[in-house]
Image (spheres, grey):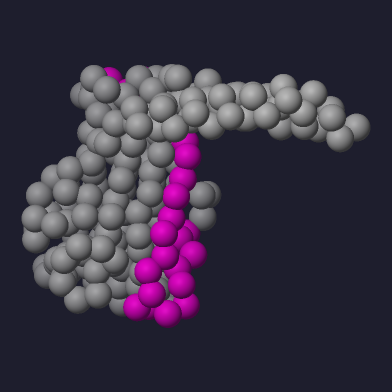
Amino acid sequence: MKKILGIFAAGTMLFCNVTTAQAVELTTNGGFETGDYTGWAQFPTGAGQQTITNVNPSGGTFAASLNNDVVTSNSLIKQANIGIGTVTPGMMILISFDARGSYASPGGVAFAEFFSELSGGGTSKSEILGGAPLALDADPNKWKTFSFMTTAGPNVSGGVTLQLGAVNGPAAGTHMFFDNVSVQAVPEPATMAALGLGALAILRKKRNK
């Protein structure tokens, strides 16, 4: 049994390594290294809120800065309608980014939202990644990496959209920084690799019994 488990584990690891390399990056300018918002759709709630900074980026030279100075609003940036023709219904999607900043009190938060888009408008699936506001580091100058695994909705004729924002409640002043944004579409073989890992866990459980 140990020999079988060893062979199975080695094969699964090899399979995972191969399929991970097949993941397709969907974002444009996810690190903001163009020095501007090329590739991003911007939805500020006031003038001058969304800038690019070279002070304390997480990687490279630049990072996005969203300084929301309007109460009860959400200053947004989006990688909008990406992956048309690449993302298929139910496909596994890996999303990651670095974030830091500070929330206005009371009511300030930031969300990462993901949408499966319909051609011509509307969505087939929408979600707040992690199901809650981003839990930033207490130090507003310290970056934290966020990673999420999800799946595309049943209709992605309009691609998919990742939305990042800086939300104010009754007080203004939520200031968010984002960097190293990645949205990857993972082909079906990687899903099979994940199932292989699950099967390995079942075998180990039976062995322990």
Image quarter of the N terminus: top right
Query: Looking at this rendering, what residue extends furthest in the right direction?
Result: 209
Whether residue 185 sits left or right of residue 205 in the image: it is left
Residue 25 sits above or below residue 7 on the image: below
Residue 4 sits above or below residue 204 on the image: above
Q: Position of residue 42 (x, y in %)?
A: 17, 53
Whether residue 195 sits left or right of residue 91 in the image: it is right
Query: Depth check: 95 or 167 in front?
Result: 95
Q: Position of residue 82 (x, y in %)?
A: 23, 33
Counting labels gives 0
Whether residue 7 sits left or right of residue 118 in the image: it is right
Residue 59 inside the magenta-drawn segment: no
Q: Position of residue 135 (x, y in %)?
A: 49, 65
Please state the extent of the stretch shown in magenta in the rendering.
133-157
Residue 85 sits above or below residue 151 on the image: above
Q: Position of residue 55 (x, y in %)?
A: 19, 76
Q: Give the residue at x 17% y 43%.
A: 28
Q: Is residue 128 visible?
A: yes
Q: Give the residue at x 51% y 49%.
A: 130
Image quarter of the C terminus: top right
Residue 109 sits above or below residue 22 on the image: below
Query: Looking at this rendering, what residue extends furthest in the front direction?
Result: 3
- Which quadrant of the view contains residue 45? bottom left
Q: Is residue 116 visible?
A: no
Whether residue 158 sits left or right of residue 203 in the image: it is left
Q: Give the residue at x 35% y 60%.
A: 98
Q: Give the residue at x 27% y 59%.
A: 179
Q: Main secondary structure of the magenta part?
A: loop
